[in-house]
Image (spheres, helix red, strand yellow):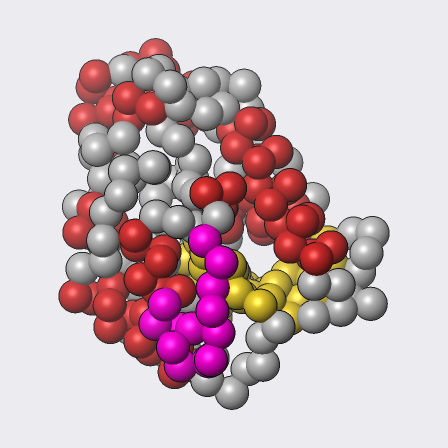
Amino acid sequence: MSTRICLVRHGETAWNADRRLQGHTDIPLNDTGLAQARATAASLADERFDAAYSSDLTRARQTAEAIAARCGLTPGFDAGLRERHYGGFQALTYDEARARFPADYQRFESRDPDFVFPEGGESLREFASRIHMALEHIARTHRGGTVLVVTHGGVLDIAHRLATGKPLEAARDFTIPNAALNWIGHDGDAWSLIAWAEQRHLTNALDELPNA
């Protein structure tokens, strides 16, 4: 029995607009993000979900709550669905991170799977393992169902690679817009990509920053 998961990146935040690394920093949606959350909710109003999950960070919670209110869902909030922890890069723009941590930035930019951000961050490999476990738990729990998951750009980067077999260290060649719809499936053994970056309900949604 195949499980379908609809992955939604949270709506836009002020830090998204500033091209600033958020990670575990708890930033709310801006006005554009709130409007995107409502538009995403309307686009999913006719979809039947068996369950809903969300990262526990405010920007994801606000997006999930807008969709849940429209779809009659009660989301569960899970810290395992948080964005990657960017350590000392958090709150910096990409240019600021490059200037402050030039050697570390080079490893980040090259998508070195074993590079750990300074000041308590996660490696790409550690992050991917966390997201794999979270998604596999959801798929097993709701086998044969349809599940909504509201989360972050870096999580969607990992999910796309999980569904397609694209290596962690390969450059990203797919978009991850705020509040777009992304569908993956699990047949009990393997993941598959169903649809990606559906955004007919959105206008000018920002793509995730590079090297998510």
143 versus 13 height, above or below = below
Q: Point out the residue furthest to the bottom here.
A: 46
Q: For the C terminus, give its image quadrant.
A: top left
51 on left or right of 63? right
Percent position of residue 82, x then y: 43, 43
Task: From the top left corner, tell me how far across and down residue 177 is, in percent.
Answer: 38, 59
Tell which of 159 and 171 is nearer to you: 159
Q: Is residue 72 magenta?
A: yes
The image quadrant of residue 119 is: top left
Q: Is residue 109 visible?
A: yes
Closer to the camera in the image, 198 or 28: 28
Q: Is residue 212 left or right of residue 149?
A: left
User: How many circles with numbers are drawn on the protein?
Assistant: 0
At 62% across and 50% down in the image, what residue appears?
A: 135
Instruction: Give the residues in magenta.
Output: 65-77
Q: Residue at x 62, y 73 (%)?
A: 50
Report x, y in % for residue 117. Answer: 39, 20
Residues 175 and 64: in front is: 64
Name the residue rendered at 46%, 43% in the picture.
Answer: 79
- Which residue sits at x=81%, y=56%? 188
- Is residue 71 depicted above or below 209 in this figure? below
**Left or right position of 165 against 105:** right
Quadrant holding the N terminus: bottom right
Question: Is 36 inside the magenta-drawn segment?
Answer: no
Question: Does residue 202 show up?
Answer: no
